[in-house]
Image (cartoon, grey):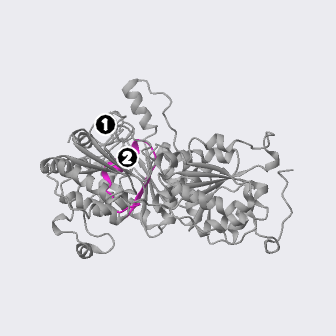
Amino acid sequence: MANVAPEPVDPAERPLSAGHLIVAQLEREGVRRVYGVPGESFLDVLDGLHDSPISTVVTRHEGGAGFMALAEGRLTGLPGVAMVTRGPGAANAFIAVHTAYQDATPMILFVGLIPVADRGREAFQEFDLTGWFGSTAKKVVTLDDPTAAARVVAESVHVARSGRPGPVVIGIPEDVLTLPAGSSGGVRPLAVPRPRAAEAELKELVRRFERARRPLVVVGGEEWTAESGQELVRWATRHSIPVLADFRAYDAVPHDLGPDIENGPERGLEHGLEQDLVGTGAYVGSLGFGRGDHAARLLDEADLTVFLGAPRGDVLSDGYTRGLDSETVLVLPGDAQGHCGRIDQFVSAHAPSFVLDLVTMSASPDTDVEWFGAAREAHVRFTTPTPAPEPTASEGSGDAAYVDLTAVMAVLREELTPDAVITYGAGNHALWPARYLPHRAPASLVAPRNGAMGMGIPAAVAASLAFPGREVVSVAGDGCFLMNGQELATAVGHGAVFVALVVDNGCYATIREHQEGAYPGRPSGTRLTNPDFAAWARSYGAYGETVTSDRDFREAFRRARASGLPAVLHLIQDPAVRAPATTTV
């Protein structure tokens, strides 16, 4: 019977199995962690991990495991790996696969499957792997040949990283995993193509820049480096070309050309950072939900828009309504998937590498300097937090005090290290960090571009494990937090350290805001009953503290950071506040 545990076998006395070969190949691919909930369908892989240098991060839910793998892929460029069991386990991980697909993030999901002989018989937890994941993964493959284990892993990593990155799902039948694999060394990892632009393509783009008066650059996608981001912003600043970021790709380029993060201002100047550019830059904000009106105007008014690593999609263009008819250059490593509107020049190239080629080309564009300056000024005004002078309270709430999130963001701008990693899920709480927290280092933001709730805490766990020397802060709504807040136990168990700000307003605020606009006075299905989040955190062995006034936030944040533990600051927010105060720019 499929559910009867096999007799234990001394690993030293058996030949290399397919399950062990999978682990060996993951080691060759450079994988450092796998995230998952254990299942009897992949016991042999778990046995292979027992003696492996790969860390096995045991999560409390498959959704948390998937989001952690997604975050690892976003932050490192190497596909994050999650392992789940068949049926229910795979269903729970589906949200992360969908997110990785729409976010274009490399990820590998291993799914344990029923024995091959049991297929098609409605066996326990049986399901159709391709039927479930075929529409939301780059590739779905089932390992039926044990000798192909290493090849399947190598090809899956290659597919996940190549072209437009994304998730690959590998089905691993439990009986196939225990069969001899016939190899002990795995296969050589496959080289990942990073296409470069031809010189003629670069010259054509330079000519387009020289003809334009109001050129605009929009950045997005994965694998931006400190060098590529800074070089682009320096080049754009010299030529008065504004740079916008795609939705939740805010860390692609530095938001200002301040001192070199790791080596101080002197080192930054040695690398060519002119003194008069320190503290300035060409970055003028982001597009998509929560964007400033000035950013939308730039998209409307540009006479040349160059998309580097990001297509002109739904969210970026305000629902396919903005910037569709301007002269357009699209630079993507694959095809034009997800792009809408005009394309005048398409360059199949890895965007960060393309930038390093572009900035070496001689160009003398005659741009509208006033247009550029006004955009930068509007961005600075829009992203400068202006806290309320006194704690706010809802009408009729008496002496109740609440935390002003704008004031919290002002404190974080002063307290956070320059390369801090920020994570959040989906909901109105994300409007504050997206608007007010600047990014100066690559791989410093993990947030779902597809709007998936529950990602912030798993992402914080993965960020801390991937970058143990960097500060990690997660901003979570009360609804978003409890979708995967149980992964605080994973953080405690595996030594992840971060500060989670849980914004408690007692409702699903994004939906409530839509209701207030479309059905005023008729809230329905959006009220939340919340626990004492600080006490809840302490019960896990984490740090927990409740903050009811923004005047107390700075010291509470310092205590949380100094605890050396995963920490939760329970912020009580005015239930009537839906978003940062409107700023006209």
* Foreground pick, 379 / 367: 367
Question: Which image quadrant: the C terminus?
Answer: top left
**Residue pictured at 46% horizontal, 37% vertical:** 508
Q: Is residue 551 left or right of residue 170?
A: left
* Foreground pick, 421 / 114: 114
What amino acid is at disc 1?
A: Leu
What residue is shown with label 2? 247
Q: Earlier in the sequence, mark 1 or mark 2?
A: 2
What amino acid is at disc 2?
A: Phe
Q: Position of residue 268 (x, y in %)?
A: 26, 72
What residue is shown with label 1? 324
* Foreground pick, 361 / 406: 361
Q: Is residue 171 left or right of residue 427?
A: right
Residue 31, quarter of the rendered image? bottom right
Q: Is residue 404 visible?
A: no
Q: Is residue 321 visible?
A: yes
